[in-house]
Image: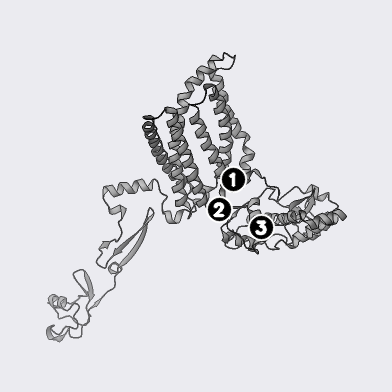
């Protein structure tokens, strides 16, 4: 058999090429020469020097592929023969039971979990779900108590025979008071978002105390029912507003890939399952305890155990939460530690209950006050010159630091844009200015409380105030970025700066300027 135009021959799906110089060779001989060329057995020896070279083909190259399926990374290996294997269990190739499990997990767990949420997400969700379970566990008992106590309370109210004091009117008043209180709590919400973790804990304490109070209605006199629930409703509304404002940024901080919608929905799904399980356990426990103790005792036991469990698990959740904004209380804590430890910047305090107790102390510094009182100060021009290189001006008014954010037209008094690990956006410039102003404000407060100031004030109060301004300025970093960088490295959330005051700086220019 002659090969007049033979260029290629396929055997066992392998491609090889014959040299075009040799034509007198049979197909059988050609195939036998595969992998053994040069072939000494070819007729006439024509194939003795024929080289058979395998052509490279992408389909014949082994490939390793990694793919995320849910929160798992699945590896696939494709060999040169096109056979696909996987050392991992792929949900797509598993049986119906595994596929069903995967679908359920996909409705509960954010996709690509290790990459799409913050590092604290898993730990905080575990404690939060435990808290949801115990909350529903206790809530079942308190609901049973309220439903049991309402009939005797209505009867006792009707027996008073007071005009207008009807069951319908009292219930309407009880419900409306809670709603009005939540509106009135707006200012508390503004306070709470500046110091979130202790306010979240305080709010949860209020809610769990309310659960126990609800449970107590079945063992208290009937006439106490409406006043007790009305008062507790007001307290709960205020606490709920504070807690909601304090925790509003937790979701956005944990959904780090712009997947807030998905994370929120799946968190809700997780919570639904946890509360369902908790309510079921509460009903079963209440029934079991009711077989050997009174209804009132059983309700109080279940509600009390659940409420205490809620507080413990929520405390654990907040301890695991990586959310420690830079605020006045945090700055005071850091600067006190620095003073006592040779400038060392500490991590955020772990004493959460101590922070809750400290909520009674309000912030005193305003990093962005109104500028008019400063303009009226006879020493304004001197102060303006003193702070020409700073993004703020500080004076002493009524024995306290008075801070105004400012920008001199044509000057370089604003902080430079941050570099990693600090936020690199221009909006952070004002936050850095506020932080620097508060730093000097705290230093000034220390000097105002010192014996040196007291002695200087006895001689000349104006000179003493000027001494405070100059000394605190010297003790305040000219560049606040290294300080914030160290705070970030210590565990503070420097991307969230929360101080009181107007963030927009006042613009200062000469009277002949073009701007008003």
Above or below for 264 versus 287: below
**For the view shown, which residue lies furthest in the front direction?**
292
| Image-based side of 413 in relation to 104, left or right | right
Q: Position of residue 161 (x, y in %)?
A: 57, 13
Residue bearing the label numbered 1:
356
| Residue 25 visible (yes or no) | yes
Residues at circles 1 and 3 in contact by the CB criterion of under 8 Å: no
What residue sits 31% from the left and 55% below the top?
Answer: 90
Query: Which one is earlier in the sequence, the residue at label 1 or at label 3?
Result: 3
Q: Position of residue 59 (x, y in %)?
A: 29, 67
Numbered circle sitting on residue 322: none
Asked which secondary structure carries label 1, the reply is helix
Query: Which one is earlier in the sequence, the residue at label 1 or at label 2?
Result: 2
What residue sits 61% from the left and 34% below the top?
Answer: 183
Asked which secondary structure carries label 3, the reply is helix
Residues at circles 2 and 3 in contact by the CB criterion of under 8 Å: no
Quarter containing the N terminus: bottom left
Asked which secondary structure carries label 2, the reply is loop
Q: Position of residue 269 (x, y in %)?
A: 42, 42
Nearer-the-camera pick, 122 or 66: 122
Distance between mark 2 and mark 3 Cα atoms: 17 Å
Numbered circle sitting on residue 350: 2
Nearer-the-camera pick, 112 or 124: 124
Q: Position of residue 448 (x, y in %)?
A: 77, 54
- Splitting the image into 4 quarters, where does residue 72 fall? bottom left
Distance between mark 1 and mark 2 Cα atoms: 12 Å
Residue bearing the label numbered 3:
335
| Residue 512 visible (yes or no) | no
């Amino acid at each position: 058999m002659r090969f007049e135009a033979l260029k290629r021959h396929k055997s066992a799906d392998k491609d090889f090429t014959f040299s075009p110089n040799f034509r007198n060779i049979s197909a059988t001989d050609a195939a036998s020469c595969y992998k053994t060329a040069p072939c000494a057995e070819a007729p006439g020896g024509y194939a003795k020097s024929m080289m058979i070279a395998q052509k490279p083909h992408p389909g014949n190259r082994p490939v390793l592929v990694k793919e995320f399926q849910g929160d798992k990374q699945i590896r696939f290996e494709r060999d040169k023969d096109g056979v696909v294997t996987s050392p991992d269990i792929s949900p797509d190739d598993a049986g119906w039971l595994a596929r069903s499990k995967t679908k359920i997990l996909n409705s509960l767990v954010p996709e690509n979990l290790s990459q799409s949420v913050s590092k604290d997400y898993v730990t905080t969700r575990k404690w939060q779900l435990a808290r949801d379970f115990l909350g529903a566990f206790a809530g079942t008992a308190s609901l049973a108590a309220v439903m049991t106590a309402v009939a005797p309370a209505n009867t006792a109210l009707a027996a008073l025979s007071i005009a207008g004091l009807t069951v319908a009117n009292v219930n309407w008043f009880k419900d409306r008071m809670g709603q009005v209180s939540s509106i009135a709590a707006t200012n508390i919400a503004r306070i709470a978002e500046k110091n979130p973790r202790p306010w979240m804990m305080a709010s949860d304490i209020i809610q769990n105390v309310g659960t126990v109070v609800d449970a107590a209605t079945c063992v208290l006199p009937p006439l106490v029912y409406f006043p007790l629930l009305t008062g507790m409703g007001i307290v709960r509304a205020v606490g709920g507003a504070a807690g909601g404002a304090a925790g509003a940024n937790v979701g956005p901080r944990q959904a780090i890939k712009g997947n807030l919608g998905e994370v929120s929905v799946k968190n809700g799904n997780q919570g639904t399952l946890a509360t369902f399980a908790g309510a079921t356990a509460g009903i079963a426990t209440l029934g079991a305890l009711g077989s050997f103790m009174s209804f009132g005792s059983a309700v109080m036991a279940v509600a009390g155990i659940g409420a205490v469990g809620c507080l413990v698990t929520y405390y654990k959740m907040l301890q695991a939460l990586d959310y420690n904004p830079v605020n006045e209380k945090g700055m005071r804590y850091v600067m006190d530690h620095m003073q006592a430890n040779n400038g060392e910047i500490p991590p955020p305090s772990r004493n959460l209950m101590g922070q809750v107790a400290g909520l009674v102390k309000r912030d005193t510094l305003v990093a962005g006050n109104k500028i008019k009182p400063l303009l009226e100060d006879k020493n304004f021009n001197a102060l303006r010159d003193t702070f020409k290189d700073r993004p703020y001006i500080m004076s002493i008014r009524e024995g306290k630091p008075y801070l105004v954010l400012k920008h001199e037209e044509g000057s370089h008094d604003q902080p430079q844009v941050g570099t990693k690990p600090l936020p690199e956006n221009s909006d952070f410039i004002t936050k850095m200015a506020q932080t620097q102003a508060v730093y000097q404000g705290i230093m000034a407060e220390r000097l105002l409380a010192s014996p040196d100031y007291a002695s200087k004030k006895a001689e000349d109060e104006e000179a003493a105030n000027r001494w405070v301004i100059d000394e605190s300025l010297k003790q305040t970093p000219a560049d606040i970025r290294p300080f914030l960088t160290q705070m970030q490295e210590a565990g503070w959330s420097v991307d969230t700066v929360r101080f009181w005051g107007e963030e927009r700086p006042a613009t200062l220019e000469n009277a002949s300027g073009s701007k008003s």
